[in-house]
Amino acid sequence: MHKKIVLAYSGGLDTSIILKWLKETYKCKVVAFSANIGQDEDWDEVEKKAWETGADEVIIRDLRDEFVRDFIYPMMRANAIYEGQYLLGTSIARPLIAREQVRVAEETGADALSHGATGKGNDQVRFELSYMALAPHLKIIAPWRIWDLNSRTRLIQFAESHGIPVPVTRERPYSMDANMLHISYEGGILEDPWQEPPDDMFLWTNSPENAPDKPDYVEIGFEKGDAVSIDGKAVSPMKLLERLNELGALHGIGRVDIVENRFVGMKSRGVYETPGGTILRIAHLNLETITLDREVFHLKEGIITRYAELIYYGMWFSPEREALQALIDKTQERCSGTVRLKLYKGQAYVVGRRSDNSLYNPELATFEEDDVYDQRDAEGFIRLQGLRLRGRMKA
């Protein structure tokens, strides 16, 4: 049996039930660990509820700075996006939570880790692969895969019989996850991919129809691929993302509605709000268009799909992700400069970019008369490119 278990605890009904179930099932101490990564929570209430539910220790860590600096920013340097639309808001948070959970286990002398992810989702994979990479000696307990509380009715019965408060307000019929980068919605009406999400579902962004009729302009400054300033003012990564979230939410930017392929094998519909992250990715990608060499740019484009898959699949701490990150970070050595964007009615339009490292040469690109490009040279270039194509017709 175990001597102490660290539970990734959110304060919601499910993890409250899990906390009590762990104590009953394993007859050992349970540490309730919560990570503040920007979700809207009353942390005093979360702590109070954990104590009342039977936690032997309660540890809440503010990881917002670390989340943006060490996880979101490296991902943004890669322009990572899963299946062309999903900005990986939940995926990138799990390795951070898992890493801190392992630290808490080491600090408290625990010998096991537990989480509240179900047996159908991606999060169980992300948590457990991170645990295995960081602390393979710790045991993993996944209650949803082993207990008999396999229905909402049984969960509520367990909660009521153990004095765990069950919310009496009308429950939002969605499974939600929130942090500084995004809010996700799954389940309920969204399980029908034909049904449009109701506008009152969205908790963060204005609908584009209700966004201001006047655009905002914002300038984002970058150094070696990382955003460091907004409108000329240097700010921390966390403060910068907070400001972009405010602007993006105001203008209805960052809503996506997708059917994605889960790692566990099924298709799942998800609706996401990622206001600041959407702006940041667009800005960074456009700065790269003037600072990266063509072949480096194309090489980097070719690995984005693989890099994004690794994050989605829970492989943040894998050697292959670290190897790709080293390549990506090498490409960012010249990626410094400023991007100017116009925010309006659900869109972030790039309207300017500049850099001391710019490879854009107006003398070469001009349609007016120039002295640096002899257009006659293009004939030989084209003939060589077409050599193999002409050869096919003779074969």
Image: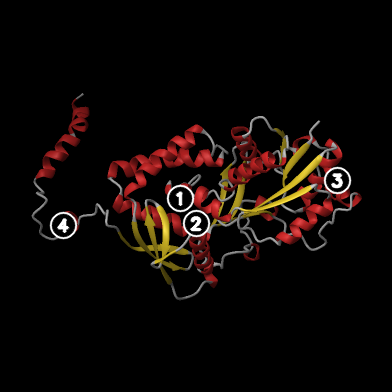
Q: CA distance from mark 3 to mark 2?
A: 39 Å
Number of the front mark, 1 or 4: 1
Q: Residue furthest right?
A: 161
In the image: residue 372, left or right of residue 315: left
- For label 4, the SS is helix
Residue drawn at 22 percent across, 28 percent down: 392
Q: Amino acid at mark 4?
A: Glu
Could you tell me which residue is drawn at 62 percent across and 51 percent down? Answer: 193
Which badge, 3 or 1, comes first in the chain's sequence? 1
User: Amino acid under label 2?
Assistant: Gly
Tag 1–tag 2 contact (CB < 8 Å)? yes
Circle number at residue 277: 2
Residue wearing tag 4 = 363
Mark toward the start of the polypeptide (3 vs 2): 3
Residue designated by label 1:
76
Q: In 3D space, how far apart are the residues under numbered discs 4 and 3 (Cα atoms)?
A: 72 Å
Residue nearer the viewer, 369 or 258: 369
What's the mark number on residue 154?
3
Image-quadrant location for residue 255: bottom right
Of badges 3 and 2, the one in the foreground is 2
The answer to which of marks 1 and 2 sits earlier in the sequence is 1
